[in-house]
Amino acid sequence: MAYSHKAVDRAAVVDNLEMPRAVSGDGITLAQPGPEHTPAYQKLYGDPSSKFIGGPVDAGGAWQRLATDTGHWRINGFGRYVILDDHGEMVGFCGLWFPHDKPEVEVAYGVMPGMRGRGIATRAARLVAGVAERRGVPTLVSYIAVQNEPSKRVAAAAGASLDGHCDMAGKPHEVWRYVVDARQVKGEPVLLEATVMPLNIRTARLALTQCRSDHFERYAVFLADPHSLATMGGPATPYEAARSMLAAAGHWALRGHGLYAVEYDGALAGFVGLARPHGAREIELAYHLLPEARGKGFATEAARAVLWAAAEQGLSQVYSAVHGDNAASLRVVSSLGAVADGTVIADGREAIRFVHNLSADRPTPKAISA
């Protein structure tokens, strides 16, 4: 039986559905993921048995999963919780999952090796589904790989029933549907925190903001363009773009800084900001503009504002990696006063390492406000 998804207004879901930061009940505690859960994510996603939840991956891949989960909360106001035991240790995850390639909100779950078979996922899924219903989720499903029999048993025990079949990322899945009464019940707002860098910056022409759900369409088109990604590792599918955007937002929650969405005249023009993925020892100033936004000085204007804010927050040095054949990017780092200092490997090939030396008395760019 084929699956026909329910008509869901994504913008309405994101605008109206907010989940609490933490949930307790039925003997378990659910909390938002944070940097302290990095070792647990590495254990969970590094295990060979994690094949149904996107593993196994190395430490960097596990950190990317953590960034994606925290970014989902930051963009949507809901996401996947970590499941904590009585000692505050992570024993799994469970929560709402709604990247742009998913047609409906999903209850997603996974449990640590050695902790399975104890009803943890069932209790967590039942708890999440109940809270989501009270918060007004319009529909709720779980997408389960056809070979994943334990996950089907969890969904059934949590109150879902088989509703059809579909493909997810090119693989056959079953759709298990939860019965919900979509009452729009508002809860406490989910707040954003900023550590180190301001959440928003305005310059003479640009607004540097946090990533939002309405940025995705242009973001996905940008990542799908092979010319745009000539220096970034190649084009991305919508599936990859959805998770990339969530991870970029999650970087903020894990690091206290990240890439800003750069808007000009209300439209997304690109991304500029600070990045330090797992294993990186230094903070990188990175910038990527949509094709139609290039050649207007936007990268320089936004990057100068980011460097000023970084200096205000006490950072003394960041770097940029620029490939020698990227003339436009070379002009940007030159206009910012960066100094070439050796080479680094970026996107699988050698790039020039440019150092930006910062100071607290760095002049304020014109018309900037944080």
Image: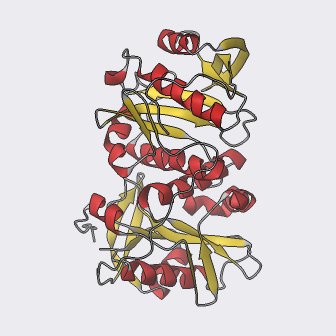
Q: Quadrant of the N terminus?
A: bottom left
Q: Residue at x 43, y 30 (%)?
A: 203
Residue 13, image x, y percentages: 32, 65
Residue 348, x across and y down, in percent: 63, 25
- Percent x, y of residue 341: 73, 13
| Residue 320 placement (x, y as % from top left) | 62, 23
Q: Is residue 185 above or below residue 100?
A: below
Q: How many marks?
A: 0
> Which quadrant holds residue 179?
bottom left
* Most foreground residue, 317 or 10: 317
Q: Is residue 144 visible?
A: yes
Q: Residue furthest bottom?
A: 26
Q: Nearer the viewer, residue 226 or 290?
A: 290
Quadrant assignment, res 202: top left
Task: Answer above or below: position of 306 versus 135.
Answer: above
Q: Residue at x 50, y 39 (%)?
A: 370
Residue 236 placement, left or right of 90: left
Q: In the image, what residue occupies the spot 68% across and 23% down?
A: 345
Residue 231 lies, with reference to residue 18, above or below; the image says: above
Q: Residue at x 37, y 19 (%)?
A: 294
Residue at the far left in the pictured view: 7
Is residue 145 shown to the viewer in this render?
A: no
Tell me the quarter of the picture where residue 4 sits. Answer: bottom left
Q: Is residue 366 left or right of residue 219?
A: right
Q: How is the image coloured?
A: secondary structure
